[in-house]
Amino acid sequence: MGMKVVALAGGIGAARFLGGLVRAVEPADLTVVANTADDIRLHGLHVSPDLDTITYTLGGGVNTEQGWGRADESLAVATELAERYGQPAWFTLGDRDIATHLLRTRVLAEGGTLTQATAEIAAAWRLPFRLLPMSDDLVTTRIVTADGRDLGFQQWWVGERAGPDVAEVRFAGAATATPAPGVLGAIAGADAVVLCPSNPVVSIGPILAVPGVEATLRHAPVVGISPIVGGKVVRGMADRLLPAAGSKVSAAAVAERYAGFLDAWVLDDVDAGEVAAVERLGVRAVTTDTIMRTPQVAAAVARTALDLLTLVVST
Amino acid sequence: MGMKVVALAGGIGAARFLGGLVRAVEPADLTVVANTADDIRLHGLHVSPDLDTITYTLGGGVNTEQGWGRADESLAVATELAERYGQPAWFTLGDRDIATHLLRTRVLAEGGTLTQATAEIAAAWRLPFRLLPMSDDLVTTRIVTADGRDLGFQQWWVGERAGPDVAEVRFAGAATATPAPGVLGAIAGADAVVLCPSNPVVSIGPILAVPGVEATLRHAPVVGISPIVGGKVVRGMADRLLPAAGSKVSAAAVAERYAGFLDAWVLDDVDAGEVAAVERLGVRAVTTDTIMRTPQVAAAVARTALDLLTLVVST
């Protein structure tokens, strides 16, 4: 029996890391719990960007250049919706991608759960690990802008290109949500829980906001990889959101957000100067090259993280 | 003010005839009531084949070669649904066509009616007449086969290529359905109601089966164009269904089905020998070239029909 591992994941950064993690552990012993608070209903379709980015990346069908969406994609449906029917075009869905959303939406419309839809899609892509949504309930990240507007996350991020300053981030529906079946059990039974190098505010944050998740993490061995390198985001917009959430934009500041349950933290080599600050939180820290240019580098990061966690747990 | 005209319509044959009718009357005074009992839910999408064939044909976007679906169509979504996700592929939806179904399905999911969805789609196509579904309620044509199976119409027609012999045709939900808003009013106020040369069993039949329609037609001036020419169908499968519905496959036999409300009937020149039989039903009959190779021929058929009806009404 291999090490039972749970990964908490957002989108692109997590997907690239997971491409390494499946090389570092036995995939059959891996459960990936993905953020679904970025989910959005577009043209009546239930779109789950993080689930799909993970599925397409690990299934070998992602547009590797942009990191999301499908390779060899076309836009016939979106073009017709916009040009013929005047439908909103700020969030473009590719044709192949729409096939995924149609399947998911139909399962949900027939009374199935997001967990069931996700399992059906993951099986079609022959994912070698278990992929779970964080919850079958609707949890929605809302961005309250400095000028007082309450926007959906995708509206702020994609629709307004993260332009408006952020006053507050909240997760509508989280307080009454239930973790998806299998989530708490996987965490409770894990030999290692890995926080992917995802946005701490709007990717990992919503997963932690689902009641029961953080409490269960407190009793599990948890290691994370910093999504902040040299005081900057590797990708995404965490630098816009961390200040609104009361944190500095640094590897140590992200570790501090997780300090209540974090046992080990992997920083990039350029952040060696922050190791001491992390260890003062009671979190064991190590540095390595965390820029995951290839799955081989990502696998090395995963091994570093799991080795450090094993060391912490055994001492 | 022009003549107020209502056309009862099925799919391809009706759409070609309507291409002539809009040249023969003032389109703003025309209401087209379309069969929706062929509607089917596929991949969670609400597909309305007859409404769409009429819309695409009259809107200038139809695949003229096949008579249905969109010109310049692609199949990216359908291919992905079939090949990646193993979804049923017996009824293929094109990408541009899917945009229409997405719009309709979203309107319905948001609590709108099929009438509202149809109006929104028709407006996008700038149809110059009013297009109405026969009902906002679900009415579904069922084909009971000779070997005792109860199939949806599309399953029999498209899925099994009309192979199994037909024992019975019924319209599930018709007895409790209500005509769509505007249907009865349009018929009651019409100077002419035209039965398009559509399948009498599964295109015109379901419209007549909606409670109130046939009773209202009895008080309206009604002319029809025979879909049977020389004892054969011009297109479609009425020859397979008329016997199951108790009629012969002839122009006169179709007129007889409508005899309770029909005032005038247009037959093809090759069926001149049936004129006497039609007139014995108390229905005025005339023959002309009804093979609508061009919109000009279709317009001539429409003028012949309306002229005959005007003559009948005035005498």
Image (cartoon, coloured by chain):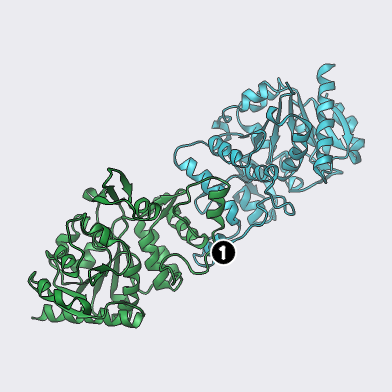
Chain colours: A green, B cyan
Measured along the vertical axis of the image, is residue B25 above or below residue A145?
above
Q: Residue furthest right?
A: B273
Q: Quadrant of residue B265?
A: top right
Front position in the image: B208 or B3:
B3
Q: Position of residue A200 (x, y in %)?
A: 23, 62
* Residue underneath mark 1: B79
At x 12%, y 65%, the residue is A259
Position of A266 relative to B120 (above/below):
below
Q: Please indicate whether residue B302 sits to the left or right of residue A144 in the image.
A: right
Q: Answer above or below: position of A69 versus B48.
A: below
Circle 1 packing at 10 Å, graded few (<14), some (14-19), many (20+), is many
The quarter of the displayed image where residue B246 is located: top right
Residue A253 in percent (x, y) is at 16, 65
Looking at the image, which is closer to me, A164 or B50?
A: A164
Left or right side of A32 for B179: right
User: Looking at the image, can residue B63 be seen?
Assistant: yes
Q: Residue furthest top?
A: B315
Secondary structure category for the residue under label 1: helix
Residue A195 visible, this orientation: no
The percent coordinates of residue B76 (x first, y second) are 57, 62
Chain letter of the residue carrying label 1: B
Residue A105 appears at what percent x and percent y?
43, 53
Type of amino acid at the residue the image marks with label 1: Thr
Camera-side residue of A130 and B211: A130
Quadrant housing the C terminus of chain B: top right
Quadrant in which the N terminus of chain B appears: top right
Residue in front for this viewpoint, A38 or B201: A38
| Count of numbered badges drawn on the protein | 1
Relative to residue A305, is residue A277 drawn left or right?
left
